[in-house]
């Protein structure tokens, strides 16, 4: 968390390594010429829909001087032109034009052997699962569905079972290394201890039925709970600060919810290695993406969505419940703080210092019945060490 050389290697071995990185939703590219910008690790990327409907992912960096080519978050265009010297690229990343390529009055310009075909934008391989678009720099990584595995693919199918619509975006600034958030999102143990709102209003407690699912040797994980199965008693009187007795909400509409899935699951947090989180928290649906910015700084990008055919009452529930999550959310505000508490405390630790990750033993396996486990975190670090060669 404190070593600049490791941070640099992560960009190369993890984000540009044999993984599939979340890019965007297909629905964000509604027509030919639609584009959206994002990041893969620190690398800026443009995702486009070409004239024939195909999706492309291109490094957002002009081949000439390395300037950022597209400065907008999303939009519609026929081509991308760099503001610096007007080099122009088509929707597939081919270099289509170079300003003054022939010079002025036959003088200057590029040499005759300059071949535009050799100077296109760097491209990523692209694949979609249920309308969720992923990209990779790797030529060797397996196809997307094999990478995700059957259980993770099944969960995408569960949520993306009909057309979706983007409802909005959050960006959450975090003063911590990106991996601290990757631990946090996978961690079912902390949720009802750190988050007062979850425990007090009985939205998520370890005394509900639930479990964890691991895939790809633990690289990808999901933890889930079923709100209707909560047992009383085990939190009360424990002194856990997140359980506040005798409080209520002046406006209880925040807790209004509808059971949408017939499996009874009310919270499902799916983490896809390395940096993607897919969430269903009651009626809020979202993709989250970690964007490392520096050794001790990262940003979390949220895309909130609902279904195209939501009735007005359900749509309002999704929007109201969106106050549970995001930078100022009643729940996830704390996730932005605890990472920083760790980052602030580990300055000066020796290289062989370590944390404890023994809840649930040493196994990395799917379980039902208990979420008092850190198997999901052990899974993340297994993938990390494998790619980093540690
Ligand atoms: Fe949390």
Image (cartoon, rainbow, N blue to C red):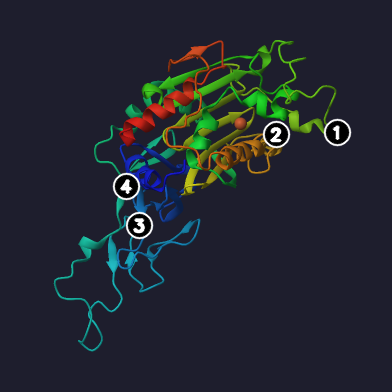
The 10 Å Cα crowd at callout 2, few under 14, some 14 to 19, many 20 or more, is some
| Residue 251 drawn at (x, y percent) | 83, 34
Identify the residue position indicated by label 2 in the image.
317
How far apart in space, not on screen, are marks 3 and 4 (Cα)? 13 Å
Name the mark on residue 91.
Answer: 3
**Front-most of residues 6 and 129:** 6
Identify the residue position indicated by label 4 in the image.
124
Left or right of residue 298, residue 245 in this image: right
Mark 2 and mark 4 lie on one chain; the one further toward the N terminus is 4
Helix, strand or loop for disc 2: helix
Up-down relation of residue 96 to residue 297 (above or below): below
| Residue 220 drawn at (x, y percent) | 43, 27
Helix, strand or loop for disc 4: strand
The 10 Å Cα crowd at callout 1, few under 14, some 14 to 19, many 20 or more, is few
Residue drawn at point x = 34 percent, y = 36 percent: 19
Residue drawn at point x = 34 percent, y = 33 percent: 144
Quadrant field for ligand 1: top right
Q: Of tags 1 and 3, which is closer to the observer?
A: 1
The 10 Å Cα crowd at callout 3, few under 14, some 14 to 19, many 20 or more, is many
Tags 2 and 1 touching, CB below 8 Å: no
């Amino acid at each position: 968390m404190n070593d600049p050389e490791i941070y640099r290697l992560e960009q190369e071995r993890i984000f540009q390594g044999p993984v599939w990185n979340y890019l965007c939703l297909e629905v964000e590219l509604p027509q030919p010429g639609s584009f959206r910008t994002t990041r893969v690790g620190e690398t800026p990327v443009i995702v486009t829909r070409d004239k024939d409907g195909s999706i492309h992912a291109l490094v957002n960096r002009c081949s000439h001087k390395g300037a950022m080519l597209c400065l907008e978050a999303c939009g519609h265009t026929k081509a991308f032109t760099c503001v610096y010297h007007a080099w122009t690229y088509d929707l597939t990343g081919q270099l289509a034009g170079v300003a003054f390529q022939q010079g002025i009055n036959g003088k200057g310009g590029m040499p005759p052997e300059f071949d535009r075909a050799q100077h296109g934008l760097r491209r990523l391989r692209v694949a979609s699962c249920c309308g969720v678009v992923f990209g990779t720099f790797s030529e060797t990584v397996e196809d997307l569905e094999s990478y995700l595995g059957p259980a993770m693919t099944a969960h995408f199918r569960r949520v993306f079972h009909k057309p979706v619509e983007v409802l909005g975006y959050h960006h959450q600034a975090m003063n911590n290394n990106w991996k601290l958030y990757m631990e946090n999102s996978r961690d079912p143990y902390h949720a009802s201890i750190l988050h007062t709102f979850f425990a007090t209003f009985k939205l998520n407690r370890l005394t509900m039925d639930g479990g964890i699912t691991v895939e790809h040797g633990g690289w990808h994980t999901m933890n889930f709970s079923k709100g209707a199965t909560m047992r009383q008693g085990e939190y009360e009187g424990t002194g856990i600060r997140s359980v506040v007795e005798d409080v209520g909400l002046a406006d209880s509409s925040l807790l209004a919810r509808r059971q949408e899935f017939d499996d009874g699951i009310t919270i499902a947090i799916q983490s896809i290695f390395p940096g993607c989180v897919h969430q269903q928290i009651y009626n809020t649906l979202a993709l989250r993406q970690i964007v490392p910015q520096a050794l001790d700084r990262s940003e979390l990008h949220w895309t909130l969505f609902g279904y195209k055919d939501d009735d007005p009452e359900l749509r309002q529930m999704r929007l109201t419940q969106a106050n549970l999550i995001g930078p100022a959310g009643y729940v996830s505000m704390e996730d932005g703080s605890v990472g920083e508490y760790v980052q602030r405390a580990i300055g000066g630790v020796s290289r062989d210092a370590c944390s404890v990750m023994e809840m649930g033993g040493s196994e990395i396996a799917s379980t039902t019945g208990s979420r008092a486990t850190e198997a999901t975190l052990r899974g993340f670090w297994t993938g990390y060490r494998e790619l980093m060669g540690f």
